[in-house]
């Protein structure tokens, strides 16, 4: 069986990379390496998740751990509970947006802080029998208890962060994709209404269903967006929201059904935070950044560039004390939420922004779309991503005004810019191209890189 361990989480095909026995060993190793006495456990809506969660619980209990079980919940609820309950770590059983025959685990330590690369490597080595130490014998004292009531505290935290009384009136079309978001959204809607929010939520594909009868919830893929876009228009909503499977990401649509680019959401949220915290630091990734950097500068903030990926973004958040961090792939991080990512906070904050500004989402993002057009992420399957990236650099870097290697290869030219980076998990190169006010430069930039890769 191949290893399901990736760069900073665990993800694999059921029966080939991951099964119950593997999950049990990983959980025991996790508890042993962290010296954990209590661990939060949650799972998504996949059909394989209950049995894998049972295996994780069994492994933790055999290590003497008290398992604080949230049941069906989102990754951000696991983050919150890990910190709120003062546990020694947390495990989320999820494969997020991967195909239905995949599953995995996300691991955090105390305070919902990501495991260091050294700790993560130790968990892997111990679970795979490659450590100089062996998994200990069964330790007495373990158990499993229902901790799902912590959702009320999670809802209270979010409602307090978004200023519920200032939200609405607004009709929002919400597509949960049959993932884990539905029950949490219902609880959150009640909490918001009790504090004065005026939201008319239209629910689509709301019930959790691990068969994913309406397709895998991955709104980042352009082919998955039309369903939400059409439903927004049909409902007469002012905004649309689509979640991935464990709802640590949300994707926004304007009232005309137009998809709002991830970098434009980051820019909106950066501006909103800087209006409340003048001069604060904002963390962002280097894939598409001109709209974000321009917004941060205009609002008097400090731009902090960090590599793509939650481990790097959260580290930069904690290191700099940044009030907010965002990635164009729809991960949004909040200082007042353990510097963790949330899929519920972004759309609520944008809804509040609409209420305060009196503008529509179409209007708010119109200038960003016009002034900073971008390609969206384009994937290329290549045999040797590193060699191909080197080839692109040799051909294009001599004509660039600047080069940056924070994450992959970033080259800036007169009026346009590209970022090319290798996937952490697949033999893919991921390309993003942006421009200042000229969509033609975006198309030309994509064509230049495509010609080099396809040659």
Image (spheres, rainbow, N blue to C red):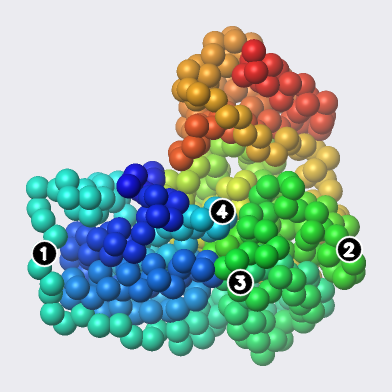
Q: Residues within 10 Å of mark 1 (few under 14, many from 20)?
A: few
- In the image, residue 154 lies at what x, y percent? 50, 79
- In the image, residue 428 lies at what x, y percent? 54, 32
* Residue where numbered disc 3 is placed: 209
Gap in angstroms between the C-alphas marked 4 and 2: 28 Å
Front one among 138 and 219: 138
Gap in angstroms between the C-alphas marked 3 and 2: 25 Å
Which mark lies nearer to you, 2 or 1?
Answer: 1
In the rendered image of this protein, does residue 419 appear above or below residue 352?
A: above
Left or right? Give the position of 283 relative to 126: right
Label at residue 233: 2
Label 3's element?
Answer: loop
Residue 282 in sight: no
Q: Residue at x 68, y 30 (%)?
A: 433
* Residue where numbered disc 1 is placed: 136
Gap in angstroms between the C-alphas marked 1 and 4: 35 Å
Front one among 183 and 12: 12
**Quadrant location of residue 141?**
bottom left
Which mark lies nearer to you, 3 or 2?
Answer: 3
* Residue where numbered disc 4 is placed: 99
In the rendered image of this protein, does residue 167 appear above or below residue 6?
A: below
Residue 328 in sight: yes
Who comes first in sequence, dot 4 or dot 2?
A: 4
Q: Residue at x 61, y 29 (%)?
A: 380
């Amino acid at each position: 069986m191949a290893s399901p361990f990736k760069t900073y989480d665990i993800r694999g095909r059921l029966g080939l990379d991951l099964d119950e026995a593997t999950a049990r060993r990983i959980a025991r190793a996790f508890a042993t390496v962290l010296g954990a006495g209590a661990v939060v456990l949650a799972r998504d809506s996949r059909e394989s998740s209950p049995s894998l969660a049972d295996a994780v619980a069994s492994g933790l209990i055999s290590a003497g751990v008290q398992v604080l079980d949230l049941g069906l919940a989102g990754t951000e609820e696991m983050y919150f509970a890990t910190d709120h309950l003062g546990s020694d770590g947390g495990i989320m059983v999820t494969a997020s947006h991967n195909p239905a025959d995949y599953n995995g685990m996300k691991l955090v330590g105390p305070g919902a802080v990501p495991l260091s690369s050294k700790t993560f490597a130790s968990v892997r080595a111990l679970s795979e029998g490659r450590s100089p130490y062996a998994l200990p014998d069964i330790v007495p004292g373990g158990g499993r208890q229902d901790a799902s009531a912590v959702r009320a505290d999670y809802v209270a935290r979010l409602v307090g962060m978004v200023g519920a009384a200032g939200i609405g009136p607004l009709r929002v079309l919400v597509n949960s994709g049959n993932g884990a978001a539905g029950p949490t959204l219902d609880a959150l809607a009640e909490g918001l209404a009790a504090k004065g929010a005026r939201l008319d939520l239209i629910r689509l594909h709301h019930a959790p269903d691990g068969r994913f009868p309406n397709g895998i919830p991955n709104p980042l893929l352009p082919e998955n967006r039309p369903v939400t876009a059409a439903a927004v228009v049909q409902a007469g909503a002012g905004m649309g929201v689509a979640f991935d499977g464990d709802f640590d990401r949300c994707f926004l649509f304007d009232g005309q059904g137009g998809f709002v680019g991830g970098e434009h959401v980051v820019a909106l949220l950066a501006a909103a935070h800087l209006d409340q915290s003048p001069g604060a630091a904002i963390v962002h990734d280097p894939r598409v950044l001109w709209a974000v950097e321009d917004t941060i500068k205009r609002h008097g903030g400090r731009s902090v560039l960090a590599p793509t990926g939650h481990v790097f973004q959260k580290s930069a958040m904690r290191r700099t004390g940044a009030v907010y961090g965002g990635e164009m792939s729809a991960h949004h991080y909040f200082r007042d939420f353990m510097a963790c990512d949330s899929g519920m906070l972004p759309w609520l904050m944008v809804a509040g922004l609409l209420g305060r500004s009196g503008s529509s989402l179409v209007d708010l993002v119109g200038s960003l779309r016009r002034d900073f057009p971008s390609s969206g992420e384009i994937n290329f399957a290549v045999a040797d991503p590193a060699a191909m990236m080197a080839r692109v650099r040799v051909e294009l870097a001599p004509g660039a005004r600047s080069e940056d290697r924070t994450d992959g290869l970033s080259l800036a030219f007169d009026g346009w810019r590209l970022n090319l980076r290798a996937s952490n998990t697949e033999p893919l190169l991921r390309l993003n191209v942006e421009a200042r006010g000229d969509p033609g430069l975006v198309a030309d930039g994509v064509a230049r890189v495509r010609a080099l890769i396809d040659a």
